Amino acid sequence: MAGQTKRGSRGGTHVIRHGRGHRFFLTVPRDLRDVVGNAAVTKFFPANVSAKLAAVSAAALSKQYGALFGYLRALPADERAKIVAAGGFKNASNDATLLDALAERGGGPLFEGENLNDKLEDYPELETEFEITALLLKKARAALPVATVDGELGLQSLVTLAGKVKPQSAKSTKRATLYVARFVGVVGNKRPQDVTAQDAVKFRDAIADQSIANQAQQLGKLKALFGVAIDEALYRGINPFAGVKPRGTAKKLSEKKRAFTPAELKKFLTASKAVGGDFDLIMRLLTATGARSGEIAGLRCKDVRSVRGVAVIDINDENRPVKNMTSVRLVPLPSVLARELLSKAKKGQPDDWLFERVSDGAQGGLAHALQIQAGKILRAKVTSDTRLTLHCLRRTWRGVALDLEIDGSLSRAILGHGKGQDVHDEVYGKRPELKKLQPVVEAVAKELRIV
């Protein structure tokens, strides 16, 4: 969730999603950055602190930093100079010094000239505790009316609303939160009803240096979020992102990613075999099935099994995010890989990762590592053409399927594309026709010479 407390003319306070918790972020006014010793201050609230409580906490913490800013602004020039010379207030002082000084002064300039005592009268704990504790969070929560908290959630409330109207995948929610945070960074954390078409254009111009596809994705997501808010009667008006299109020139077809040539694929698989281990097996599996690297990186041992006599990998969203609903599928394995993968899966426990983790065990960690390592091999052993990436194995699979004149619905079902539902759709109870799909995978693997 995100929120914005009352702020100075050039500062900004936000609460944004950060992993499983939330992070408080406060911009330090420019005239105080050398005195404070930072351009911004942050604080992490763990997952056991709710979104609403994080917003309340941020409001309370913002008041404390506001008190600090007021105190520092009121200092004589020579005292400020001493603090700057010492490396900023964070190094030159401590909580007790700050609070004693504030008590002696009886207040100071905070937000738009409001008095310190007026800001802290509902928060007696703030006079003796600079760092927010669990107890203080509970007391601060009771001190602030719910309406104030809800009002401070700002534009990130659009993400929450969209999730309530239609459940979103973790990946989609993460992207929406990121795009809204970027938008807030450009136009400020306004109320949704206060966002104008000029704000949307300003954001579009701010991301104009990105690719057409990236611009379209961000503008489209923000348009969808505002569309939900209007449909749910959060406010009345015209969608501010309606008609706002990406700027720039789309890439020429010759500049986009392409498929491997037979010679390039042979060089790549030979180099992968030299690396050996899981990397070699994963590269052969990606080539033979056309799956995404993230899907393969997220396989558990239980996801490799036989279904009605056909060896398959089960790409699902039980333990990891998938790109979309049609990405959830059973993909038959070619005979050249089936025995090797089934044997490997049987060696572990059902919930064990099929492939060895490279860092903290996260799916993204392995997928990213695969892309990096494959990229290095491609540049060193195959070609200097940067259009050729690990994902191009997927394009190669599709191209071979077309050359073999395989029915489009079958290849789409294997790749996890939306229109493959006619032969591979378990959402409404229809069994996937694996006996139709397995010969396709077998034929493509043979054509690509997977061994």
Image: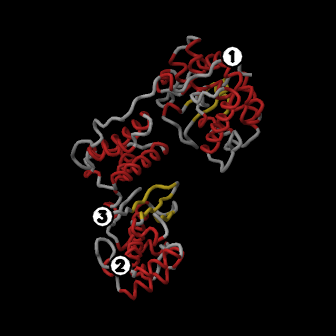
Which residue is identified by label 2?
120
Q: Are marks 2 and 3 in contact (CB under 8 Å)?
A: no
Left or right, residue 354 beside residue 235:
right
x and y, in percent, of residue 28 in the image = 42, 66
Q: Is residue 217 visible?
A: yes
Identify the residue at the far bottom of this view: 104
Check if mark 1's residue and mark 2's residue have beta carbons within 8 Å.
no
| Frontmost residue, 230 versus 424 | 230
Judging from the image, the colouring scheme is secondary structure
The residue identified by callout 3 is 147
Residue 309 visible in the picture = no
Q: Nearer the viewer, mark 2 or mark 3?
A: 2
Of marks 1 and 2, the one in the foreground: 2
The local secondary structure at tag 1 comes to helix
Q: Name the mark on residue 446.
A: 1
> What's the residue at 50%, 22% (across, down)?
254
Q: Marks 2/3: CA distance?
A: 19 Å
Considering only order in the chain, which callout, 3 or 2, is on the residue closer to the N terminus? 2
Q: Amino acid at mark 1?
A: Lys
The image position of residue 349, as x and y in percent, is 72, 43
* Foreground tag (1 vs 3): 1
Q: Residue at x 33, y 66 (%)?
A: 8
395 left or right of 177 in image: right
